[in-house]
Image (tube, rainbow, N blue to C red):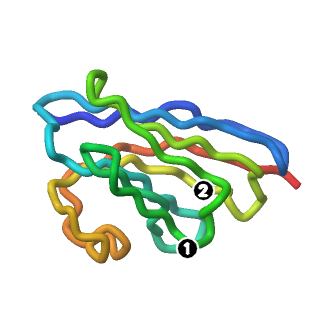
Amino acid sequence: QVQLVESGGGLVQAGGSLRLSCAASGRAFSAYVMGWFRQAPGKEREFVAAISWSGLTIFYADSVKGRFTISRDNGKNTVYLQMNSLKPEDTAVYYCAVDQSFSESNWRRANGIEYWGKGTLVNVSS
């Protein structure tokens, strides 16, 4: 059974930083794309970032580009999201996701993503 477990969320002041982690287990994840989505209160879930198995292909939502950095450790089946210069509008539940699809459009639309974590709350105060 596949499990994705996020950690690292919390309360931070605007301008601060947080690092999220997501540990995947339950199967081999070679060639899988790993990524992050978020859902703010009263809003739809939105794409944040994704990274290919090799780490050579990465894409970000425009709203986080230049502030967030995604990375992964394949030996640990773990994906990270370093979030800097946080803003109150970054407040959301952040979800880890894993899928075989390499399609950027699928990821940006959250189309058919195979595995999801349960989420970790990030609260950025002004």
Q: Residues within 10 Å of mark 1 (few under 14, many from 20)?
A: few
Disc 2 target residue: 92
Q: Which part of the image, by quadrant, shows the N terminus?
A: top left
Q: In the figure, is residue 76 to the left or right of 19? A: left
Instruction: Look at 38% across and 44% down and name the residue there.
Output: 118
The residue lying at 57 percent from left, 32 percent from top is 8
Residue 32 locus on image (x, y percent): 19, 47
Q: Which residue has dot 1 on it? A: 43
Residue furthest out toward the front:
56
- The amino acid at mark 2 is Ala
> Dot 2: within a 10 Å radius of its alpha carbon, few (fewer than 14), some, or many (20 or more) residues?
many
Label 1: element kind: loop
Q: Residue at x 50, y 31 (%)?
A: 7
Q: Left or right: where does residue 68 sit relative to residue 39?
A: right
Alpha carbons under labels 1 and 2: distance apart: 9 Å
Which amino acid type corresponds to the residue marked 1 in the rendered image?
Lys
Q: Is residue 9 above or below residue 36?
A: above
Q: Please tell me whether mark 2 sits on a helix, a strand or a loop.
A: strand
Q: Earlier in the sequence, mark 1 or mark 2?
A: 1
Image location of residue 108, percent across then percent down: 37, 72
Quadrant in which residue 89 is drawn: bottom right
Quadrant containing the C terminus is bottom right
